[in-house]
């Protein structure tokens, strides 16, 4: 999954594509580099980020979605939003997935996903982006995250969403410290709450690499990101959400060739 942020304030400057044509160009480039999914978002959810209006978010994402699908009609596009109205407009424009960092806690979002037959990714986040990294505490982070994801998946399935159209995301860096993040990554597919459901990791260039490796700038964190991606490959993680599609494609093709033998 390639990340395209149509925002001026996402934490990694290399992912900011606030101009429509730039967002379209980058999306098409990621598809050509091997991305199976393009995740387009118009509102930053980095620590400390402020919310924007539905109208502003729509003005950022819809022209990019429409432009990508005009250039590549076969593209599988995910809309990264927690707002049902943004998700509805994106689906009507051709998006096939909703990536909701709040875990689809809005009943309207659940109904929308179920009624349209869309894919959905539900993520665990403790708190809100404005405060989520202010000393997050858990008694048992793995159990708490698994219980939350299990409940959200159950709600979606009861609403009529097929399990094989659901992904869960432990929410690395969303209300977690470095030890919480590592425990969740180590658990891997053990966080999947229901047979048929997939799992997504989103660790690309995140602050955990400042804590783990001393890489304070997001621009310095590609090697650490690729290291976690390799662990994800051997943990059979279904989707890796990344900024650097070409580097990840090379990594995964090389791992597959060595692990199974022959060209991938």
Image (tube, rainbow, N blue to C red):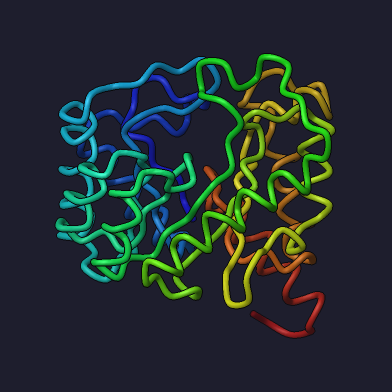
Q: In the image, what residue occupies the spot 65% across and 47% down?
A: 170
Q: In the image, what residue occupies the spot 83% across and 28% down?
A: 213
Give residue 253's position: percent from left, percent from top.
66, 69
Question: Which of the 4 quarters of the picture holds residue 3?
Answer: top left
The image shows residue 17, relative to residue 201, as above or below, that is above
How many numbered dots are placed on residues in this image? Answer: 0
The image shows residue 211, relative to residue 31, as above or below, that is above
* Residue 92 shows in this picture: yes
Front residue of 263 and 128: 128
Front residue of 174 and 114: 114
Give residue 206's position: percent from left, percent from top.
64, 31
The image shows residue 143, relative to residue 140, as above or below, that is below
The image shows residue 28, relative to residue 192, as above or below, that is above
Q: In the image, what residue occupies the spot 61% across and 66% down?
A: 238
Give residue 83's position: percent from left, percent from top.
30, 39
* Residue 227 shows in this picture: no
Q: Indicate left or right for 148 with 48 as reference.
A: right
Q: In the image, what residue occupies the spot 45% across and 25% down?
A: 10
Give residue 58's position: percent from left, percent from top.
19, 36
**Quarter of the image that includes the C terminus:** bottom right
């Amino acid at each position: 999954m390639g990340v395209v942020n149509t925002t001026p304030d996402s934490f990694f400057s290399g992912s900011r594509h606030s101009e429509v044509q730039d967002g379209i160009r980058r999306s098409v480039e990621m598809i050509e580099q091997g991305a199976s999914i393009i995740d387009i978002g118009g509102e930053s959810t980095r620590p400390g980020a402020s919310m924007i209006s539905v109208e502003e978010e729509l003005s950022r994402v819809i022209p990019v979605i429409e432009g990508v699908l005009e250039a590549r009609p076969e593209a599988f596009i995910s809309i990264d939003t927690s707002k049902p109205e943004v998700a509805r407009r994106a689906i009507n424009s051709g998006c096939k997935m909703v990536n909701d960092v709040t875990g689809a806690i809005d009943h309207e979002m659940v109904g929308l996903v179920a009624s349209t037959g869309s894919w959905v990714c539900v993520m665990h986040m403790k708190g809100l982006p404005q405060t989520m990294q202010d000393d997050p505490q858990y008694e048992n982070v793995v159990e708490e995250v698994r219980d939350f994801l299990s409940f959200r998946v159950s709600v979606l399935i009861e609403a009529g969403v097929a399990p094989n159209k659901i992904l869960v995301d432990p929410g690395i860096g969303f209300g977690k410290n470095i030890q919480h993040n590592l425990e969740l990554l180590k658990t891997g597919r053990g966080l999947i709450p229901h047979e048929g459901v997939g799992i997504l990791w989103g660790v690309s260039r995140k602050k955990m690499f400042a804590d783990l490796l001393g890489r304070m700038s997001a621009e310095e964190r590609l090697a650490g990101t690729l290291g976690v991606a390799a662990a994800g490959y051997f943990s059979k993680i279904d989707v890796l959400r990344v900024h650097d599609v070409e580097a990840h494609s090379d990594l995964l093709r090389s791992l597959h060739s060595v692990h199974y033998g022959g060209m991938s």
